[in-house]
Image: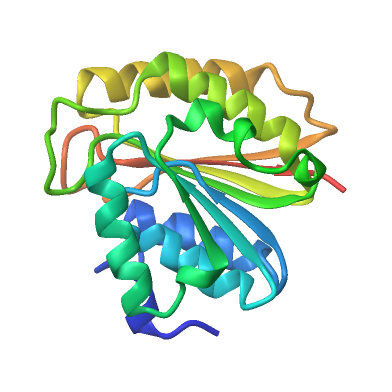
Amino acid sequence: MLTKKDKPYTSPLDAVAMSHHLLEAILEEGDIAVDATAGNGLDTIFLAKLVGEAGQVWAFDRQEEALHKAEANLVIEAMRSRTTLVCKDHSRFAEEVPEDKKGRVGAFLFNLGYLPGGNKEVTTTEATTLAAFRQALEWIRLGGVVVVVLYPGHPEGAREKEVLLKEVSALPVKSWQCLHACSTLSHRKNPPEVLALRRRK
């Protein structure tokens, strides 16, 4: 069980907290996980702790600045050895994760938007996020989960939400269990949202 120190959020109703609860319920020791948007590495660290020493996490970000911060944080937490950091857009994760892992990944996490503390003009985009999401559905194992934290409060984030919800609405119910939830609804306009899909066994 992870401690409060392992969970980098301030409220159990925070969107990132919700995403972590879902991941904690699914991932097991020795699992494979993909952090599609490494950022400062806090989600990467969380995933690495869940999969344990026998597991492996691949983390992607197209900004070198983000990966430098992520690596520093991973080293501090002694999680570097079980993580692979890649400076590429998340839509290209299949170029780096070994082909034999296809259909065996326990979880994908997408925490969309911009790098916290970074340039807010550099964000994930509708086209690359949709491409990465579609691939993630092909790579996830039975019983595995794809979790997306959405930020519809800015224009690109709103477009990402629209295309992903449209994509999910077309998936067969017999194959996918889906959840879409808002967080802190009463406290802000267009709050972050969580979209999660579990591949049915």
Of the 4 image quadrants, the one containing the N terminus is: bottom right
Q: How many marks?
A: 0
In which image quadrant can residue 131 be found? Answer: top right
Question: Residue drawn at (66%, 64%), measured in percent from left and top?
Answer: 27
> Where is residue 64 shown, x and y percent of the image?
27, 42
Is residue 177 something one can see in this rendering? yes
Viewer-proximal residue among 143 and 103 = 103
Question: Residue drawn at (52%, 64%), measured in percent from left and top?
Answer: 47
Instruction: Say above or below: 80 vs 178.
Output: below
Viewer-proximal residue among 117 and 53 = 53
Rendering colour mode: rainbow
> Where is residue 25 shown, x and y percent of the image?
63, 66
Question: Residue drawn at (23%, 32%), measured in percent from left and top?
Answer: 190
> Where is residue 3 shown, x and y percent of the image?
42, 85
Instruction: Say above or below: 131 vs 94.
Output: above
Q: Specify whether 89 is left or right of 69.
A: right
Is residue 8 something one can see in this rendering? no
Instruction: Say above or below: 89 vs 107.
Output: above
Question: Residue drawn at (18%, 48%), measured in percent from left and top?
Answer: 116
> Where is residue 66 shown, x and y percent of the image?
26, 47
Instruction: Say above or below: 180 vs 43.
Output: above
